Amino acid sequence: METFDPAELPELLKLYYRRLFPYAQYYRWLNYDDIYIRYQSFNNQSELEKEMQKMNPYKIDIGAVYSHRPNQHNTVKLGAFQAQEKELVFDIDMTDYDDVRRCCSSADICSKCWTLMTMAIRIIDRALKEDFGFKHRLWVYSGRRGVHCWVCDESVRKLSSAVRSGIVEYLSLVKGGQDVKKKVHLSEKIHPFVSKSINIIKKYFQEYALVDQDILENKESWDKILALVPENILSQGHFYTLQQNFPKYHNSLQRWEYLMKAISLQDSTKNDKCGPCLEWEIMLQYCFPRLDINVSKGINHLLKSPFSVHPKTGRISVPIDLQKVEQFDPFTVPTISSLCRELDAISINDEGKEGNEAESDTKRRTRVSYKKSSVSPIINSPWIQPRMDQSGKLINLPANRSQIFIY
Amino acid sequence: MQFSRANWKRLRLTGDQRNVCYPHSLQFYLEPPSESISLIEFESLAIDRVKLLKAVENLGVSYVKGAEPYQSKLESEIRRLKFSFRENLENEYEPRRKDHISHFILRLAYCQSEDLRRWFIQQEMDLLRFRFSILPKDKIQNFLKDSHLHFEAISDDEKKLREPEILASSPSLSGSKTDWESESVYKIPFADALDLFRGRKVYLESGFAYVPLKDIVAIVLNEFRAKLSKALALTARSLPAVQSDERLQPLLNHLSHSYTGQDYSTQKNAGKISLDQIDSLSTRSFPPCMRQLHKALRENHHLRHGGRMQYGLFLKGIGLTLEQALQFWKQEFIRGKMDPDKFDKGYSYNIRHSFGKEGKRTDYTPFSCMKIILTNPPSQGDYHGCPFRHSDQELLKQKLQSYKISPGGIHQILDLVKGTHYQVACQKYFEMIHNVDDCGFSLSHPNQFFFESQRILSGNKDIRKESIQPETPQPKPGVQKAKDASSALACLNSSLEMDMEGLEDYFSE
């Protein structure tokens, strides 16, 4: 992959917005008549295009639809200018898993820990679709170390902050910060959401946790796992025995099976909880998604727009195809610089010796559209489920949408 | 808003027609009443409901809600005050009508501040919860339907299809076969079941929550709370107009500061206390509010006006005569290097005034707990007020420690204070210093505290002549008591009718 130099950004952005940004799809996804930028407003797509090409924003965040045109918020009576609707959004960030991933930390990601995002998407998306009945869900790569989800159903956009918080609570199982060792506690009755999530995790656990993450590789790592086992299940004596015996096994997979056997032998006598609960609690702590409640509950909260360019990595925030979640590889997502180089290559090949030798790079690039670039298959895949009503008509909504362009 | 005195609209209903008005023993109070009643009845209905809500509060902190003995005690209280509670009883029209009208009257009184609203909503919710809990199963669906709550029960087939999921999700279902067969399950949009789904206490499928009947109650109550809260806010906006009506104003003010027991103004005990007993009485039999005032007076040889009023009237109530009071205050103030002449000129007049010997000769009554808690909060340099209400937690804790209350007792008291049950906290203090499990009374007046304490300490002598049951204040013709609304009423022509239809507008948008 070509390296990305943030210093090139201003120049690259110019080209990006001129030739690569998928205005038509973007506009359709927002599906609004007007889009307001910095309290300006646009009546149609071409006006938006022109403004974006003029401004070349460094960052685009999307906010709420307001009761009045945001550019007139000063003329509206105090308190009357209110956020009225906004998509339900989720932000899953890899740094929230630092306590359970051994390969990377902080902003770094690799193929070994990316599975966490795969599992998160599967678990959350299933719940949003099957439990809550949400139909229009868009999953997007954030550009660096996580994924976002946008839920755009009409009824969802009007949900109150309290209900949004409630949804996040429903989807949360891992609780506690640095000072809490055991972050997952299951009760006697296992709610269907929990059991279905565990079934999803089971598909990935062996490969992800026992091989890639190797969570029982050495003393340091298996002590962490043992710390999650309550003393009423394994006494001090049992712990000691396990620690003595672990080195006799060759890999995490064997040690895991040994540990599970040890637990189940003690379980029935001392524990009044369900049998496999402890095994699940450990799996959940290592694999279950961690959501940031603040992102989801606020109707005013801004979230980075799909198709923005991440300023630190240069990667485009591309949608993730739900049919191919396992195949998604964040490292093959195009960066703005790679796209521009691609455009150069295409234009040279296509146009041959046509055009003036003296023609500047910029001018040449502008004659070639994004349709031939590698971002094209991403854009053209059926990631947008257009919001249509019963008769098949695209639903247009008046929008007093706030969108902040940062430059 | 005019109260039309000319249009008497009396509803005269007979027999079955009356039952149509109130088909259920409980209601959500969605429609304000529209008949006319006398001012006397207006007041007595309101006072009865205040008594009921206070009983709800007291029982709620003393016993576990929903279990015995809470259930039977509350039922007997409702019965005693003649409010409605049970279906299938004969002659339910009057109690239901009383329930309906009194609720709306109290809205007028309790919408006025955040504290009052919160208290009112809490007690009304507890009352509704109780009534709902004793509603027979077959009546529930009808009640919900009549209250325009759209919860539809799912069919047995649908229930069977989801049996394992619903059983695994709802903590309120025990899992026994018989329970499951008889339990109705309702299908409602998930957003309407927020408190259930956020804690994963209900099964969700395709945007719907499958809620067993037991949990429907929680949802219904939340609906009720939201509606009542909104209604109170609306009522508060209309209040200035209501308060401008001279018939209503004293009454409504009195209600929300309402004390419905003895006023301790009669001087039955006059002369029985000697001044040198006061120091020891203050630690043994005074409630904390008066104990702290006495201590401050002794230490600073002075009290500001608020403290002098609250403490001075209390002393009158425990039996100090005017002469004793003058001596008591003068002695103390002089110790503070006050000039005796200045005392005579400035302070003795006020003391005589409070005994009804000066000016308009009103014999002021000692302050009730409600009055102390709700009015005239203390500022820097003041020692009046209610320590449970007005002291911050740390200070209160220290105070209780200095009174040698056990840590367990202090903890219980602080918990009650956190729940804003100030008088019950004071009862707890009473129980701790007298070493009894149950103080045996519902505290609403500092002099009551003193009286009950003396009773215990003297081994229950001399009590037969004293009446200890709280009484409804009877209108005392001829006696002018500015703060007593019943006498305010007595001054009014009791044949004046109240057209409640005029009030309807205060309750709706």
Image (tube, coloured by chain):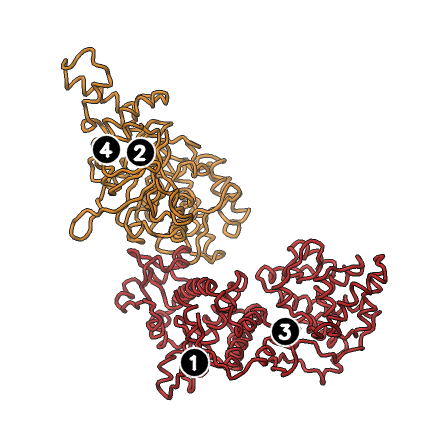
Chain colours: A orange, B red
- Tell me the residue that label 3 is attached to: B482
Q: Amino acid at mark 1?
A: Ala
| Circles 1 and 4 on the same chain | no
Quarter that holds the N terminus of chain A: top left
Question: In the rendered structure, are the residues bearing label 2 and label 4 in contact, judged by CB atoms less than 8 Å apart?
Answer: no
Q: Residue at x 37, y 43 (%)?
A: A73
In this rendering, would A238 be left or right of B140? right
Discs 1/4, front: 1
Image mark 3: chain: B
Q: Nearer the viewer, residue A266 or A224?
A: A224
Q: Nearer the viewer, mark 2 or mark 3?
A: 3
Q: Which residue is mark 4?
A: A22
Q: The residue tagged with tag 1: helix, strand or loop?
A: loop
Q: Secondary structure at mark 2?
A: loop
Left or right of A405 on screen, residue B361: right
Q: How far separated are the C-alphas under marks 2 and 3?
A: 74 Å
Q: Which residue is mark 1?
A: B6
